[in-house]
Amino acid sequence: MFNSKFRGRDFISILDFKKNEVEAMLDLADELKRKFKRGQPHKYLEDRTLFMLFYNQSLRTRNSFEAGMTQLGGHAHFLDPDKIYMPALEGEEVAYSTERISDVARVLDRMGHGIAIRMYGDPVGWQNGKANRIVREFADWAEHVPVINMEDDLYHPCQGMADIMTVREHFGRFNGVKFVMSWAYSPSVHKPLSVPHSAIIAAATVGCDVVLAHPEGLELEDRILKATEKRAKESGGSFEITNDMDEAFDGAHVVYPKAWTSKHFIPPIADEPMLEKTEELFAANKHWMCDEEKMKLGADNVKYMHCLPCDRGYEVTDDVIDGPRSIVFDQAENRLHAQKAIMSLLMD
Ligand code: CP
């Protein structure tokens, strides 16, 4: 029933989709949200099954996919990689306890209608990009069904879609919206680069004026920065990078302060994860916190965003996240609607 150009495609990065395709997904997400609120049936995926592989913890992602599939008339099947034979790349198999990804993907491909994967950080020893390689390996072998990225070490595209859906709900437009993705301090350095990557890509794709702010040493991946710049040019938006949080917040409509780790202290740039060095870098930048004083630098209608979970008292003060400018629960809610749109289009 939906546009066949989406059917069967993988959803691994927003970069795999053009601006008009992203907008079509957002329009459907809005429609599905309206239907959900009105209690109108929208069982577009009746009798379909989504297999969800979670290598990491999750509150929002698991429950929004699971509830979303139920509301669409299908079923989401939770798979704990420890309780199946751990899917492994060729050459990394261990007899008895693992199964080659090419086999796992082809089995699930025969039984259902989609495979969704979350994997970053510890399960791949913080080798940056390896989880994305594994998600793509699943996609290469799942010949008949889409693979959906529920967050790897490079991208969190479903979060990015919910983020821009929320921006459009609050501002009614993208062009002229200053969207600030800022690093913020956390006592934990176990933070992948996926959320900031996908947030700036998403916002630039639809035409926001994107500003990326971080201390020196916490740069994002070069290829993501280049892609964001290209997307901003194509969409009529803009893209700037600064090492000054106050400068970034000045006149901002959206601020999105969160921690991410240093690519310089994890492989492949470093030989192995350098935890102490990362902690030192983080500790030197404890003042990168979003508080009321910072929020006053923004536009009158500035909104505070965060993908959650957030580190209260570090990344953000309670008065900001619980205050009137915070739209974090709209963001979390929109994970449901954005993903229902993505699944409906891809698994139709
Ligand atoms: N934002 C997000 O992906 O949340 P979870 O880790 O709870 O899924």
Image (tube, helix red, strand yellow):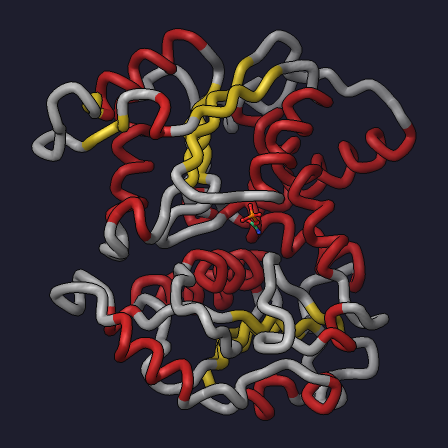
- Residue 186, how many percent across, how many down? 50, 74
Q: Is residue 111 visible?
A: yes
Quadrant that contains the C terminus: top right
Residue beneath the point at 76% across and 62% down:
327
Farthest residue to the left: give it: 91
Q: Position of residue 214 (x, y in %)?
A: 45, 81
Q: Is residue 113 left or right of residue 340?
A: left
Q: Residue at x 29, y 14 (%)?
A: 106
Q: Residue at x 63, y 45 (%)?
A: 23
Quadrant in the rendering for residue 345: top right
Q: Is residue 200 above or below residue 112?
A: below
Counting labels gives 0
The residue at the far right in this view is 38
| Image position, residue 210 (x, y; %) | 56, 72
Q: Dividing the picture into quarters, in which one does residue 131 lie?
A: top left
> Image check: 116 left or right of 85?
right
- Residue 252 lies, in percent from the top left, at 68, 80
Q: State the quadrant of the N terminus.
A: top right
Closer to us: 312 or 217: 312
Q: Residue at x 68, y 28 (%)?
A: 67
Relative height, residue 31 to residue 216 (above, below): above
Instruction: Place residue 118 in its image quadrant.
Output: top left
In the image, residue 186 sits, relative to residue 193, either above or below, namely below
| Residue nearest the viewer, comparing 308 with 130 | 308
Q: Decide if residue 209 is in sight here.
A: no
Closer-to-camera residue (80/71): 80
